Image: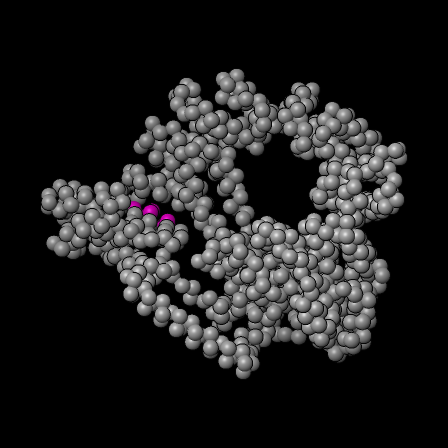
């Protein structure tokens, strides 16, 4: 025992007990392990390794998620682990345990430091190396992970999975050549033995894909052919896709064409196969085509349509490409969809609406088909009789077409009349009520839209999708309690609907409820929901940890690489940007007006709150008494939320710092969005960080200089820096940079901007907001700009109109006159109505008769 430090040595009896502590821990017999550790510590209270193992055992015995009773024990285990470090700083066990505890609470930085210290004490400890590898990969320290995997392979060269993991590590650091050498050395040693065929297929597919991504086309082909020859892979599915891509890259077009034809025989509905086939013929349909190329594409797709008559894919691709023959092809496609009664036909077609000519052509086609069907005429110019449901789906299609967001002149009234005819035809079809709700939402009447979606839900009370859609529309209408009541029908009964949906990581619910609270002025709960969404994204990232080892053991290298790449850009998800923008907007408002953090309750509301609090207190006392009588353990309850109403989030001492913390991930992951930089500007300019504010404006201008929010901010920044004292060097830098963004004479700049965007509602609103900055007391000038929104050439937008009314009220303009004009453009928009009309409309919807609920 001379090699063991004196303070770590134990007599034989205690040494045996120490081994029992380890064995019982590994067998998950935690009580026995704790008992053995306590026996040792009675005689040797300063034995650091025993303290560490006791801390680890105690921590592992606690329930997950933590309960009220387990929190003190978790804190005790944490303190015990730190005490163990002080007692024995040269033991790898004490540091390893500290790292495991830090890892369990997702403190990756502390865990990394602890594992590094542990490896210094015992570099050859296998479990420690495994943990260090996973943690390094998780924190994207790929070079450190590579070094650890090298060391692991030298210690356990007989484990095949460790060699493939080493190959993956070389790939992650960008050394593809070395990764391939590792694979080849393993293949030479194994000589095709070991591992199941699916496992070998996974590895070979990954190696081929790695060669393809590195541009090593010849090597990729050789490896793919060898795998096929050895029957490790079969030329179907993914292997065939790789084969086709390799042949195209090598310029062997005839072989590539044969491979794509084989793929199309396997799956004639895959649009990517058609695109690949055409690309092999130098016909890239994702890029602009000349007339000759277009005709070749259409001819090829027509041939495929004859070969695969039951597949709509070639016919649908033809619509993307066609110009002169578009109307003829579109009519054939739409007629086939209407006759078959395909509900998703409009969703399929609306992708063409980015081209306004095609949008108008589709409208004309469907208008003509409706007239023919109403006259009971044939859709094919012969004696054939259309199905009785064709008119129903034609009404449905045309109603959605007339109110599509890309429609320059949406006609909500006619759309609703068409849906009324369809409902008269078939009053039990949920899709019609859903379409009605969508039309009303686009018309600006969220309340009526929610009622229509509720009618759809009542047709089938057991349909979870309809239930979720109805709840989402009620949230948009501000009826949070109603929405949660509906959602509770499909959530756990022992939790609130909101808590269960948050636990299930339901992003749309967190976003929609947060927005509903924000519109109602309940900023605390809005922030609570937005932070719930941020925590969900953090959970996505934390949950990746377990897969660094699992994927290597299961040989799923392709899936592992996809996971790593996905996690690296997880916060590029649109939901993250929407929630971040909403939360930052609230914090900016609080920074401008701290009184928003104060609750403004009437005497009745205050009395009601006190009554509810008293009732809750009595219920809690009653529950404790009942638990004591029955012997239930009340400390097994989950740890309560320390901020259930979000008041702590709202009443932060530094709202701008809180906003900046939310914004920082956007700077990394959403830097290609102009919204990221306009949000950053609002924070920086209020913090007095003018150089960073300038950087945000420049970055935003590089993406979209015509963005309406950015336009207003450029004018605001020019005004701001001209009125404040700045160091001479900073002011010189700012003035030089601003000269390329916005001129010194701001009024002509704003007028030119308005003139160049005279038919865009958001840009007109941006110009009006800029006008309010330039002349805050000139209400008529602001109103004149806002009135351009009601020009028939400007597509109406209820959100823009509502913002325009708010701006008019802010500058003291005639709000009622502007309201009358915008209501003429969107007569159904409840958001644009006065307070009394809103109250009347809500009351009407509440007393209106509802269909009987089916299937409840």
Q: x, y (%) of residue 708?
A: 72, 61
Decide if residue 182 is on the left or right side of residue 772. left
Judging depth in this view, the residue of 221 and 6 nearest the camera is: 221
What is the residue that sits farthest to the top in this orientation? Answer: 229
Residue for point 55% across, 54% down: 507
Q: Position of residue 753 (x, y in %)?
A: 78, 62
Name the one closer to the observer, 840 or 578: 840
Q: Main secondary structure of the magenta part?
A: helix
Most foreground residue, 544 or 713? 544
Q: Residue at x 27, y 45 (%)?
A: 28
Picture coordinates of residue 395, whole percent (x, y): 79, 48
Rendered position, 331 above or below 74 = above
Highlighted range, magenta: 111-118
Please tell me whether residue 577 is drawn above or below residue 767 in the rendered image.
above
Whether residue 299 appears in this view of the structure is yes
Which residue does the image show at 45% across and 67% down from the upper left? Answer: 643
Please indicate whether residue 276 sits to the left or right of residue 355 in the image: left
Q: Position of residue 722 (x, y in %)?
A: 68, 72
Q: Is residue 115 magenta?
A: yes
Asked if residue 684 can be seen in this view, the reply is no
The image quarter containing residue 717 is: bottom right
Question: How many numbered discs, if any?
Answer: 0
In the rendered view, tell whether residue 533 sits above or below residue 271.
below
Figure check: 79 above or below 543: below
Residue located 20% across and 48% down the image: 32
Q: Quadrant of residue 324?
A: top right
Q: Quadrant for the N terminus, please.
A: top left
* Rendered image quadrant of residue 121: top left
């Amino acid at each position: 025992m001379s090699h063991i430090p004196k303070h770590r040595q134990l007599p034989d009896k205690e040494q045996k007990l120490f081994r029992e502590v380890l064995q019982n821990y590994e067998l998950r017999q935690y009580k026995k392990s704790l008992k053995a550790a306590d026996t040792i510590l009675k005689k040797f209270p300063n034995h650091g390794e025993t303290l560490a193992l006791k801390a680890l055992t105690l921590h592992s015995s606690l329930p997950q998620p933590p309960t009220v009773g387990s929190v003190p024990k978790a804190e005790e285990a944490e303190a015990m682990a730190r005490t163990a470090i002080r007692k024995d700083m040269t033991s790898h066990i004490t540091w390893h345990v500290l790292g495991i505890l830090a890892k369990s609470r997702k403190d990756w930085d502390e865990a990394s430091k602890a594992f590094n210290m542990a490896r210094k004490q015992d570099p050859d400890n296998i479990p420690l190396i495994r943990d260090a590898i996973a943690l390094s990969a998780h924190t994207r320290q790929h070079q450190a992970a590579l070094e650890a995997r090298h060391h692991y392979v030298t210690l356990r060269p007989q484990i095949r999975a460790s060699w493939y993991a080493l190959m993956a590590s070389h790939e992650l650091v960008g050394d593809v050549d070395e990764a391939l050498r590792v694979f080849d050395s393993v293949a030479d040693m194994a000589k095709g033995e070991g591992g199941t065929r699916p496992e070998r297929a996974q590895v070979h597919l990954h190696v081929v894909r790695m060669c393809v991504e590195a541009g090593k086309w010849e090597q990729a082909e050789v490896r793919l052919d060898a795998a096929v020859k050895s029957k490790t892979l079969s030329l179907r599915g993914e292997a065939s896709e790789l084969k086709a891509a390799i042949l195209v890259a090598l310029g062997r077009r005839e072989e590539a064409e044969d491979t794509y034809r084989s793929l199309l025989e396997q799956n004639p509905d895959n649009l990517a196969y058609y695109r690949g086939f055409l690309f092999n013929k130098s016909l890239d349909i994702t890029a602009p085509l000349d007339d000759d190329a277009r005709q070749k594409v259409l001819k090829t797709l027509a041939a495929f349509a004859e070969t695969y008559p039951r597949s709509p894919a070639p016919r649908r691709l033809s619509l993307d490409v066609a110009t002169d023959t578009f109307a003829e092809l579109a009519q054939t496609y739409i007629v086939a969809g209407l006759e078959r009664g395909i509900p998703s036909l409009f969703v399929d077609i609306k992708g063409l609406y980015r081209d306004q000519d095609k949008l108008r052509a589709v409208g004309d086609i469907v208008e003509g088909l409706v007239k023919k069907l109403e006259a009971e005429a044939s859709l094919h110019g012969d004696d054939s009789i259309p199905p009785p449901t064709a008119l129903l789906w034609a009404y449905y299609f045309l109603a959605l077409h007339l109110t599509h967001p890309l429609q320059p002149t949406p006609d909500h009234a006619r759309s609703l009349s068409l849906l009324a005819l369809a409902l008269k035809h078939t009053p039990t079809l949920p899709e019609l009520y859903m379409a009605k709700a969508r039309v009303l939402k686009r018309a600006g009447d969220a309340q009526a839209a929610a009622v229509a979606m509720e009618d759809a839900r009542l047709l089938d009370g057991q349909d979870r999708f309809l239930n979720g859609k109805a709840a989402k529309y009620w949230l948009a209408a501000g009826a949070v309690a109603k929405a949660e009541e509906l959602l509770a029908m499909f959530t756990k009964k022992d939790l609130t609907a909101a808590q269960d949906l948050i636990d299930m990581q339901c992003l749309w619910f967190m976003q929609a409820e947060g927005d509903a609270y924000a519109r109602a002025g309940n900023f605390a709960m809005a922030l609570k929901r937005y932070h719930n969404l941020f925590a969900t994204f953090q959970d996505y990232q934390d949950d990746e940890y377990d897969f660094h080892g699992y994927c290597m053991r299961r040989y799923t290298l392709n899936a592992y690489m996809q996971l790593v790449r996905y996690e690296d850009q997880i916060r590029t998800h649109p939901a993250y940007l929407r929630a971040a923008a909403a939360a930052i907007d609230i914090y900016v408002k609080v920074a401008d007006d701290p009184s928003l953090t104060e609750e403004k309750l009437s005497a009745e509301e205050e009395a009601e709150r006190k009554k509810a609090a008293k009732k809750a207190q009595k219920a809690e006392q009653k529950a404790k008494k009942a638990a004591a009588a029955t012997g239930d353990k009340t400390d097994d309850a989950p740890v309560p939320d320390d901020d259930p109403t979000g008041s702590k989030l709202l009443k932060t001492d530094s709202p701008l710092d809180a906003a900046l913390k939310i914004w920082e991930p956007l700077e990394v992951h959403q830097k290609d969005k102009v919204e990221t930089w306009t949000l950053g500007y609002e924070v920086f300019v209020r913090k007095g960080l003018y150089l960073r504010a300038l950087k945000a404006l420049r970055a935003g201008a590089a993406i979209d200089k015509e963005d309406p929010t950015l336009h207003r901010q450029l004018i605001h920044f020019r005004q701001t820096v001209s009125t404040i004292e700045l160091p001479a060097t900073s002011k010189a830098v700012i003035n030089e940079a601003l000269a390329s963004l916005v001129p010194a004479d701001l009024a002509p700049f704003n007028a030119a901007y308005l003139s160049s965007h005279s038919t865009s509602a958001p840009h007109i609103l941006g110009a009006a907001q800029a006008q309010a900055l330039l002349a805050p007391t000139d209400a008529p000038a602001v109103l004149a700009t806002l009135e351009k929104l009601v020009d028939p050439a400007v597509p109406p937008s209820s959100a823009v109109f509502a913002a325009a009314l708010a701006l008019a009220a802010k500058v003291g303009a005639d709000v009622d006159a502007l309201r009358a004009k915008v209501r003429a453009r969107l007569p159904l928009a409840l958001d644009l109505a006065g307070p009394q009309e809103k109250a009347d409309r809500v009351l009407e919807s509440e007393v209106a008769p509802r269909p009987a609920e089916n299937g409840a």
